[in-house]
Amino acid sequence: MHHISRDFVVYSLDSSHKPVLEIESGDRVLLDTWDARSGTINSTADLLLRPHPVGSNPATGPIRVRGAEPGDGLAVHIEAIDLAPSGFLAVKKGEGLLASRATEFATRIVPIVDGTVHFGELRFPANPMVGVIGTAPAGDGISTGYAGAHGGNMDNKHIGVGATVYLPVSVPGAGLGLGDVHGAMGDGEITFIGLEIQAQVTIRVELLKEAGFQRPLIETAEHWVTTGDGESLAGAARMAAGEMVDLLQTRLEMSFEDAYMLMSAAVDVQICQCCEPGEFPVTTRAVVSKGILP
């Protein structure tokens, strides 16, 4: 198995970045990831008073997949997410979904012990997930703070252990990067900050020739998940729903009308991240059971 340390990170997904590793289809890689602030938040005194000097959401990589060409796809299997002993939660003054009520900066260091989050006296299960995963887009690079057709900062909690993320390849070699792991995150991530934590993520990468993916698609043991993003919640929700209706039409060979009706009865359209809608892009998903779509 290959290994990439957290010494090799990028703050954008961009074809101009030199790959730190070249792999074959089917190879496994262990990636060490920073938290969203590159290890700079270590106590309650470390407040998010200013942006990180380099950038947020560092992604480990990029990885070049030998033989990957535009029009191909990647299947990235998330085999394991091993969390550091603690991470952080924070409030940034004047930011987030409840910005008008966030009048102070605050940081909390949060231990995770045997898969359980210790939030003061409260206890709840950790839910490790990958916030940022994507390939390099054609043309200009995109900050790891943003999502798009290439993947990126989707903040989709279905991207956990056992999930497979299907991604488009837009440039030779793909330029795969991954980071921004959360120990837990509520849908919405309403403060801008999930339980940010360093981790080790084990993946297996398959090259799918001529897959023709236009956007990320996520498969779990129980669900298929389409993705959306946009400046508005309405636009992002329509994108995820539109991707799902297309998937149902194609896979189940049904009309738009039947797929649309089926979605209204059996598909959930959900928010992934809406920390400041109208000011920061929203990410969404549509989720269907494999009992309906095998």
Image (tube, rainbow, N blue to C red):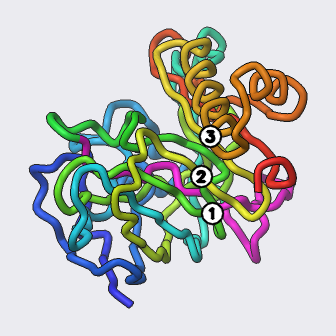
Locate residue 216 relative to residue 242 in the image: left or right. Answer: left
The answer to whether residue 292 shows anywhere in this view is yes
Q: Nearer the viewer, residue 81 or 219?
A: 219
**Mark 1 — residue?**
163
Location of the C terminus by quadrant is bottom right
Q: Is residue 13 above or below residue 102?
A: below
Disc 2 and disc 1 in contact, CB within 8 angstroms:
yes
> In the rendering, at what x and y percent does residue 138 appear?
19, 40
Chief secondary structure of the magenta portion = strand
Mark 3 or mark 1, which is nearer to you?
A: 3
Residue occupying the point 9% across, 50% down = 16
First of labels 3, 2 by sequence position: 2
Residue 8 placed where, x, y %? 23, 67
Q: Secondary structure at mark 3?
A: helix
Which residue is disc 3 drawn over? 250
Give amino acid for label 3: Thr
Neighbour tally class for label 3: few under 14, some 14-19, many 20 plus, Cα within 10 Å:
few
Expressed as whole percent of the image width and height from the top left, the position of residue 217 reads: 55, 47
Is residue 53 covered in magenta?
no
The amino acid pointed to by label 2 is Ile
Q: Which residue is mark 2?
A: 218
SS of the residue at dot 1? loop
For the residues labelled 2 and 1, the Cα–Cα distance comes to: 7 Å
Q: Amino acid at mark 1?
A: Ala
Q: At 45% from the left edge and 45% from the top edge, which residue is drawn?
A: 46
Residue at 84% x, 47% y: name it.
292
Q: Which residues are magenta?
A: 111-137
Q: Nearer the viewer, mark 3 or mark 2?
A: 3
- Check residue 115 for magenta coloring: yes
